[in-house]
Image (tube, rainbow, N blue to C red):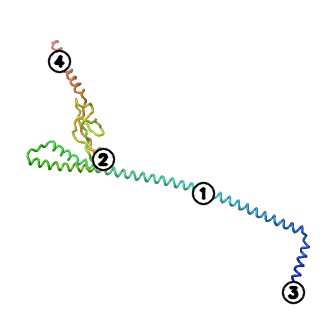
């Protein structure tokens, strides 16, 4: 009973409050509330859009900065890689050059021994059986020495009949020749050698002066003698 009475009283109060506010005011209040909600929503959307734009702008700037850093690091890597490759090649060349220099120095000291073997081979003419046996033994040692030089990359020059080249040959003598033209090698005085395509020792050679040089020299000598005879005849006539 008491609860029913309180509900009745509450309904009456609602009726009274509804009677106090006319329908126009209620509608105006609802419209105002709707507009406020729309404005608030629009402002919220504007704020969110502005924040999104700022975020995108910051991300673009950060991306651009990272791209620049990446390009810088990439260029540094390329330079370091190129420098290291050049360093490795230079080290390899230096090691090869040092190896060739050491081998060249050692082999150059051995070459005079080879020269002596060759001179002895040319000069010795064994006649007795004992001398021939000694000669064969000596020839065996010489062949072993030559084989060792070949294994080290040493090869002899073949110069007779070739044109003189100061990069390969060293001219010791020059003389006229009816067989070879000027600046062609007549004779090898000391053998030259290559080492892996490079000059280990220059060849000592005799170079041709050409077929016309001897005749010209003889003519000069004849003219000199003739002038001397004419001079003597003139002197005797004066006396």
Q: Which residue is labeled 1 in the image?
A: 63
Binning the other alpha carbons within 10 Å of mark 3 as few (below 14), some (14 to 19) or many (20 upward) gives: few
- Identify residue for label 2: 196
The local secondary structure at tag 2 comes to loop
Give the number of the mark in front: 4 or 3.
3
The residue at which mark 3 appears reads as 2
> Mark 4 or mark 1: which is in front?
1
Q: Which residue is mark 4?
A: 229
Real-space CA distance between mark 2 and mark 3, rounded to the nearest whole angstrom: 126 Å
How much space separates mark 4 and mark 2, taking CA atoms?
61 Å
Q: CA distance from mark 4 to mark 1?
A: 107 Å
| Comes first in the chain, label 4 or label 1 | 1
- Mark 3: which secondary structure? helix
Residue positioned most to the bottom: 1
Q: Is label 4 in contact with label 3 (beta carbons under 8 Å)?
A: no
Quadrant assignment, res 38: bottom right
Between circles 1 and 3, the one closer to the viewer is 3
């Amino acid at each position: 009973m008491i609860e029913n009475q309180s509900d009745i009283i509450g309904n009456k109060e609602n009726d009274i409050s509804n009677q106090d506010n006319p329908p126009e005011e209620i509608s105006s209040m609802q419209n105002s509330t709707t507009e406020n909600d729309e404005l608030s929503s629009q402002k919220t959307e504007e704020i969110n859009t502005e924040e999104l734009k700022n975020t995108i702008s910051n991300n673009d700037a950060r991306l651009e900065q990272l791209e620049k850093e990446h390009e810088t690091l990439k260029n540094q890597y390329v330079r370091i890689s190129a420098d290291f490759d050049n360093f490795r090649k230079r080290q390899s060349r230096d090691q090869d050059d040092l190896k060739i220099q050491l081998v060249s120095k050692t082999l150059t000291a051995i070459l005079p021994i080879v020269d002596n073997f060759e001179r002895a081979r040319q000069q010795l003419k064994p006649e007795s059986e004992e001398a021939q046996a000694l000669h064969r033994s000596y020839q065996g040692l010489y062949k072993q020495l030559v084989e060792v030089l070949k294994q080290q990359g040493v090869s002899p020059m073949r110069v007779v009949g070739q044109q003189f080249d100061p990069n390969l040959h060293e001219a010791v003598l020059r003389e006229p020749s009816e067989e070879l033209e000027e600046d062609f090698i007549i004779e090898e005085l000391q053998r030259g050698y290559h080492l892996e395509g490079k000059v280990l020792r220059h060849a000592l050679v005799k170079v041709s002066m050409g077929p016309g040089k001897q005749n010209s020299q003889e003519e000069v000598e004849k003219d000199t003698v003739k002038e001397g005879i004419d001079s003597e005849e003139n002197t005797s006539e004066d006396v």
